[in-house]
């Protein structure tokens, strides 16, 4: 885990993930322009590999953090608007995962293999949806995490940290 992020605060852990999502969606947008100008050169291949690494490893853990820990905890609050938002976000997770798997990742893999292909429109859609998704979670959902009891927030954070430790041990 990042030494600068408090491991006992689930909100800080989730927000740190969101910062990375935004950084990598920005990178893959710039990558499309770079490949258009310079082709799938070494710099493009390295950037594409770093985006793949993040969305293959960290993004699924982030979805697990939310769907297995945060979302069920927030449902206990009994707030109808929060429940609707949670349903929407869980559905959108599946849509983003499918777009990543079926369109965005193959495009990036082609760049890694130095076989430039035109950037599919889905790549732009994916970046925009990720940015909107992050904004929705940050503004509409995460503020409610502070309403959870401190012991529960600490348990959520431990689960998130442990999930990453298991992944690191398996790597």
Image (spheres, grey):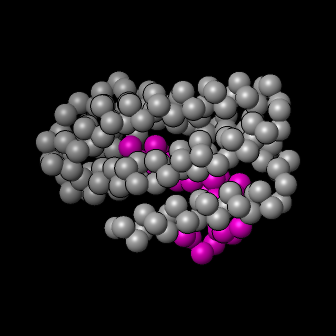
Q: Residue at x 59, y 59 (%)?
A: 160
Query: Would residue 23 be visible to someone looking at this image?
Result: no
- Residue 47: image x %, image y %? 32, 54
When the figure is inspected, residue 162 is found, relative to residue 132, above or below; the finding is: below
Inspect the magenta stretch and tell me whether residue 13 lies in it.
yes
Q: Which residue is drawn at 23% across and 45% down?
A: 109
Query: Would residue 79 be visible to someone looking at this image?
Result: yes
Q: Which residue is drawn at 27% across and 43% down?
A: 108
The image quadrant that residue 150 belongs to is: bottom right
- Numbered range of the magenta stretch: 1-28
Chief secondary structure of the magenta portion: helix
Q: Nearer the viewer, residue 119 or 164?
A: 164
When the figure is inspected, residue 47 is found, relative to residue 110, above or below; the finding is: below
> Is 85 positioned to the left or the right of 134 in the image?
right
Residue projecting furthest to the bottom: 3
The image quadrant that residue 4 belongs to is: bottom right
Q: Which residue is drawn at 75% across and 36% down?
A: 75
- Residue 3: image x %, image y %? 60, 75
Q: Which of 33 and 67 is in front in this view?
A: 67
- Residue 81: image x %, image y %? 78, 25
Q: In which quarter of the image is the N terminus?
A: bottom right
């Amino acid at each position: 885990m990042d030494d600068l992020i408090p491991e006992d605060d689930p909100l800080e852990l989730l927000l740190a993930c969101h910062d990375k999502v935004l950084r990598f969606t920005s990178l893959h947008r710039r990558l499309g322009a770079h490949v258009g100008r310079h082709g799938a050169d070494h710099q493009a291949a390295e950037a594409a590999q770093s985006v793949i690494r993040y969305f293959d490893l960290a993004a699924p853990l982030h979805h697990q953090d939310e769907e297995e820990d945060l979302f069920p905890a927030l449902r206990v609050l009994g707030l109808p608007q929060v429940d609707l938002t949670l349903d929407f976000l869980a559905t959108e997770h599946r849509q983003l995962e499918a777009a990543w798997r079926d369109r965005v990742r193959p495009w990036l893999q082609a760049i890694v293999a130095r076989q430039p292909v035109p950037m599919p429109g889905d790549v732009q859609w994916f970046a925009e949806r990720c940015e909107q998704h992050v904004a929705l979670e940050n503004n509409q959902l995460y503020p409610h995490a502070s309403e959870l009891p401190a012991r529960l927030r600490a348990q959520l954070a431990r689960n998130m940290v442990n999930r990453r430790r298991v992944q690191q041990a398996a790597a």
